[in-house]
Image (cartoon, helix red, strand yellow):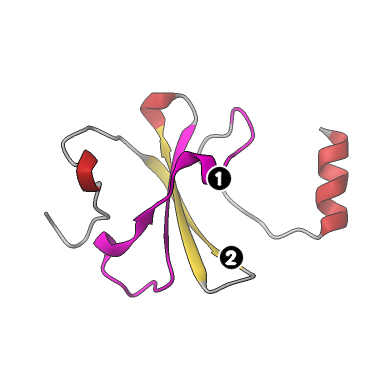
Amino acid sequence: MSPDYITRGSTQSRRRATEGPFVIKDPRQSRWYLFADYYLNGGVFGCWSTTDLDADPGSWTELPSAQYRFPSGVRHANAVRVTQAELDAIIAHY
């Protein structure tokens, strides 16, 4: 396996086609998250985390899907920081 890719661990033999990856930092802790759209699964995302962006990609930890979620229909997501008031207004609007 190439060290340039994040491992699929025990699912290495299963095809998990992804696209639209993006990385965000948790502003409350020294942790980074990589999200990728499993485009063959209709809006399902995978998520991996690390505390060291310089670490070997194979050392990123895949998170269980119960630990994160996106609104229905999201594809090729991105993230922006908003205040609590802005978030409340967005939720109220939609």
**Is 34 placed above or below 90 here?**
below
Mark 1 secondary-structure assignment: loop
Quadrant into which the N terminus falls: bottom left
At horizontal 88% and vertical 45% (from top left) the residue drawn is: 89
Helix, strand or loop at label 2? It is strand
Mark 1 / mark 2, whichever is N-terminal: 2
Q: Position of residue 28 (x, y in %)?
A: 64, 70
The answer to whether marks 1 and 2 mark residues whose Cβ atoms lie closer than 8 Å is: no
Left or right: where does residue 52 sit relative to residue 87?
A: left
Q: Position of residue 6 (x, y in %)?
A: 27, 55
Residue 26: image tag: 2
Q: Which residue is mark 1?
A: 68
Residue at (48, 65) in percent of width and height: 32
Amino acid carrying mark 1 in the image: Tyr
Magenta stretch contains residue 63:
yes
Give percent across and percent down for residue 4: 21, 61
CA separation in Å, label 1 and label 2: 13 Å
For the residue marked with disc 2, what is the amino acid?
Asp
Rendered view: 55 above or below 70: below
Name the quadrant containing residue 80: bottom right
| Residue at left offset 53%, top offset 35% | 75
Q: Residue at x 29, y 35 (%)?
A: 16
Q: Tell me, yes or no, whether the highlighted magenta stretch contains residue 34.
A: no
**Rendering coords of residue 20 (x, y %):** 43, 44
Is the residue marked by circle 1 packed among few (<14), some (14-19), or many (20+) residues within 10 Å?
A: few
For the magenta stretch, what is the residue range? 44-73
Image quadrant in which you'd find residue 94? top right
Q: Residue furthest left?
A: 1
Q: How many circles with numbers are drawn on the protein?
A: 2
Question: Which label belongs to residue 94?
Answer: none
Is the residue marked by circle 2 packed among few (<14), some (14-19), or many (20+) residues within 10 Å?
A: few
